[in-house]
Amino acid sequence: MLTPLKYMAHVLIFFTITIVQAQSVSENSILCYVSADYAVHAVNKSLSTQQPYKIACSYENEQSTIPKFIQFRCTNKPAVLNVNVHVVDGTHEQYIKQTIQLKGKNKIYEMPILAYVSNDLLLSNTAKIHSIEFTNMSDATVDLKELNFSNTSAKYEVKLNQLFTIDSKNLGSKNYMFSSATSKHVNINVYNTNGGFARKIMKTLQAGENEIEFDELQLNEGKYVVTITEQS
């Protein structure tokens, strides 16, 4: 098995920081075409169980396409949120719904859209998102902070013995996922960018998709290199 320093010798790490200014949602209406939504919309709406919160889409005569994903941030306690996306083309309409488990952390949650759009709407050149509705299904109040559209998933799939980088300041900007055919015991090894050992935790991953979280490592501010190895 390669040592940490040999791992480090096999990679050249590039760090890119992108700063996006959030745009405020005005009168519950936002621009919904992807080309405008590399910017993030600040929502800052508290969601209770009493009433859904609906955002209408506007396009300002721009050419629109249905995005692959809707991404949003929520804070507060763990909760359950129903998201209902209304897609129309003037003749056909479809509601795409998903129930999302919120973990009470300031992280990105993601809902696929384009993959579930009907063929009638896919063949239309006027199909677009009409509205997005959020319903809080839990007793705890949920703060919907930001919303954006993207053609790139926030999920970052990692594999055994793969090197990948994290920034302790921006751990909420990606969801690190590990898919496994069977349950297995692994070590999550964290190194400083100079190759020095920083932390290690042992995890049992279940069959299926597992989210790798780094909160319990209590890392100092900075950038790190991570690799996941199977316990012998």
Image: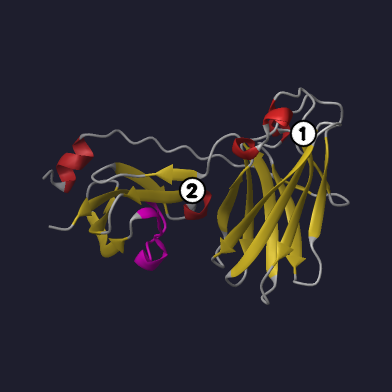
Is residue 69 at all visible to an observer of this figure? yes
**Figure colour scheme:** secondary structure
The residue at the far right in this view is 27
Horizontal and vertical percent for residue 15?
42, 38
- How many marks on residues? 2
- Front: mark 2 or 1: 1
Q: Is residue 112 left or right of residue 22?
A: left
Residue 215 belongs to the span the image colors magenta: yes
Query: Which one is earlier in the sequence, the residue at label 2 or at label 1?
Result: 1
Q: Residue 223, how many percent across, how many down?
A: 38, 49
Does residue 224 appear in the picture of this structure? no
At a point 61% along the width and 69% down the height, the residue shown is: 79
Is label 2 in a helix, a strand or a loop? Answer: loop
Magenta run includes residue 108: no
The front one of 209 and 12 is 209
Q: Is residue 15 above or below residue 144?
A: above
Badge 2 is on which residue?
A: 174
Vertical position of residue 126 compared to residue 96: above or below: above
Classed neighbour count for the residue bearing mark 1: other residues with Cα under 10 Å, few (<14), some (14–19), many (≥20): many
Amino acid on which disc 2 is placed: Lys
- At 52% from the left and 44% from the top, the residue drawn is 154
Q: Specify start and end residues of the magenta stretch as a single range.
A: 208-223
Q: Position of residue 14 (x, y in %)?
A: 38, 35
For the C terminus, the quadrant is bottom left
Nearest the viewer among 181 and 107 is 181
Q: Which residue is depicted at the point 49% across and 52% down? A: 170
Residue 188 lies, in percent from the top left, at 27, 57
**Spatial distance from mark 2 to mark 1, Cα to Cα?**
26 Å
**What residue is shown with label 1?**
128
Q: Give the residue type that dot 1 points to.
A: Lys
Task: Spot the residue most to the bottom.
Answer: 139
